[in-house]
Structures are given as structure tokens and as C-alpha cells.
Image: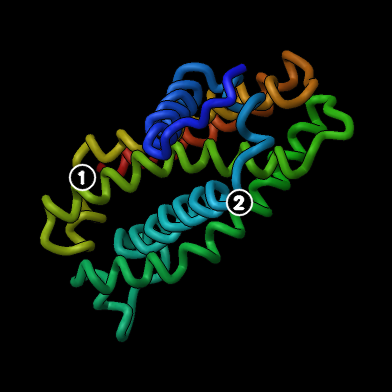
Amino acid sequence: MSDVPHPPFAAAPVEVAGVEARATDLILRPDRFARHFVPTLSRGAVVAAVLLVGFVGTADQIDLRMMGLGSSLQGGAESLATSWPHYLGAVGFGAPIAGLMQYWLGGAWYALRLRFCGARGASGQNARRWNIVTGAVASIASVTWLALGMIRYETPAAYAQTDDLANLIPLGVVLWSVWLSYRGAHALFDIGRWSSRFWFLAVPFLFYSAIMVGAMASL
């Protein structure tokens, strides 16, 4: 092995290549990504995933209220429906709290399903990390769709209340993230085949499919 030091500028292409390889594994080979990268994810990567998931979760809750599916916005909160800066400020404020809830509560639900599938002594940290990573994958589609909505619609209320069928695209990505979750569960933990198909495929697919049917019925 050569002892000749590499020039400083040689490190950047290697880092970029590493990021590209990880992204490719996450999309095309989720079991490989889960096995090799999840246990060694940096704290910064986990925090970014938590904030991304929290951002989308908070935005969804505000959108539901503006659609009339939850409690109505009143008083100063009305500005959330008419101002994109106010809307984004509120979403950004709630993102850390919502993200941490998903990290701990969602991770606990993920770990519980692992136990139902026969996993013994499973790492709770790996369960929380993989759960939040798959949630972040789905959240990327939602954030992208929100960015397009900011261009297409004058106000957050107009974006939330649109009846465009294309709004179901992010939910389709969520269904794909369910598959990622299932593949990663098998890569990281020793679980039963049929029980895992029920808890990590059938149950989430039925849940999100019900949401899609409900959304289509309201159009």
C-alpha cells in the first residue's frame, strides 16, 4: 500500500461518489443500505431525517385543518391559510417536535412489529433509525410537491383544497417506502417471512390504501 499522501482536492470526488452510492443503494438495494449504512449513520443524518419527517407531518396537519377535516383555523392562525411565509414559519416551528415524536413513537411501533415477527434482542436504535430513514424517503416527495404547490397556487389554502388527482403522487411514494421498510427489516433483523409480510406490508398497505380511497372519494 502506497504511503504517498493524496492531494487535498482528491477527497471531494470520493465523498460525492460515496453519497451517490448510498443513494443508489437506498433506492435500488434497500436491504444493502440498511445492512451497511444504517448502523453507522451520523448523528447529523439522523437529525436531518427527523426534521424532514417532522416538517411534512406538521404541514399535513395544517393542510387537514384547511381542508375542513380537522379543527378550523381561527384568529391569528388564519394567516397560515393566506400567507406562504407564515405557513412555512409555522411548519418549521413544529417540525422538530413532530419529528421527534415520529422518531420515538414511530420507532417504538416499528420495534413492536419486529417482536411480533419473532425478532429477539433487536437493536432499538437501528429500528428507530431505519423507520425514520424510510419516512424521510417518503417525505422528500411531499416536500417536492409542496415546493411545486408554492409556485402553482397563490395561497396555502388554495394548495390544500385543490382536487387535483396528481396530489395522490406523494402518497404513492409513501406506499413505496413501505416496501423499503420491509426490505430493511429483513436485512437488519432475523424475522419470520410470513409474519413480516403481514406486519410490514399488509397492515401499512391497507392503512395507506384506505387513505387514498378516502382522498379520491372526497374529490
Whether residue 202 is visible here, answered yes or no, is: no
The residue most toward the front is 4
Circles 2, 1 touching at the beta carbon (< 8 Å) = no
Horizontal and vertical percent position of residue 214: 39, 40
The residue most toward the bottom is 75
- Counting residues from the start of the chain, the first of labels 2 and 1 encountered is 2
Horizontal and vertical percent position of residue 23: 44, 28
- Kindly report the distance in space between the C-alpha atoms of the residues bearing marks 2 and 1: 39 Å
In the rendered image of this protein, does residue 93 appear above or below residue 113?
Answer: below
Toward the viewer: 218 or 2?
A: 2
Give the residue drawn at x 21%, y 55%: 159
Quarter of the image for residue 123 reads top right
- Amino acid on which disc 2 is placed: Arg
Horizontal and vertical percent position of residue 202: 60, 24
Quarter of the image for residue 111 reads top right
Label placed on residue 163: 1
Q: Label 2, secondary structure: give it.
A: helix
What is the quadrant of the N terminus in the image? top right
Label placed on residue 208: none
Give the residue drawn at x 66%, y 37%: 40
Give the residue drawn at x 48%, y 42%: 136
Q: In this view, does 116 lie to the left or right of 100?
A: right
Q: In this view, does 77 lie to the left or right of 32?
A: left
Q: Label 1, secondary structure: give it.
A: loop
Whether residue 143 is visible here, answered yes or no, is: yes
Q: Is residue 16 left or right of residue 35?
A: left
Tag 2 residue: 43
What is the quadrant of the C terminus in the image? top left
- Amino acid on which disc 1 is placed: Asp
**Colouring:** rainbow
Quarter of the image for residue 192 reads top right
Give the residue drawn at x 49%, y 52%: 48
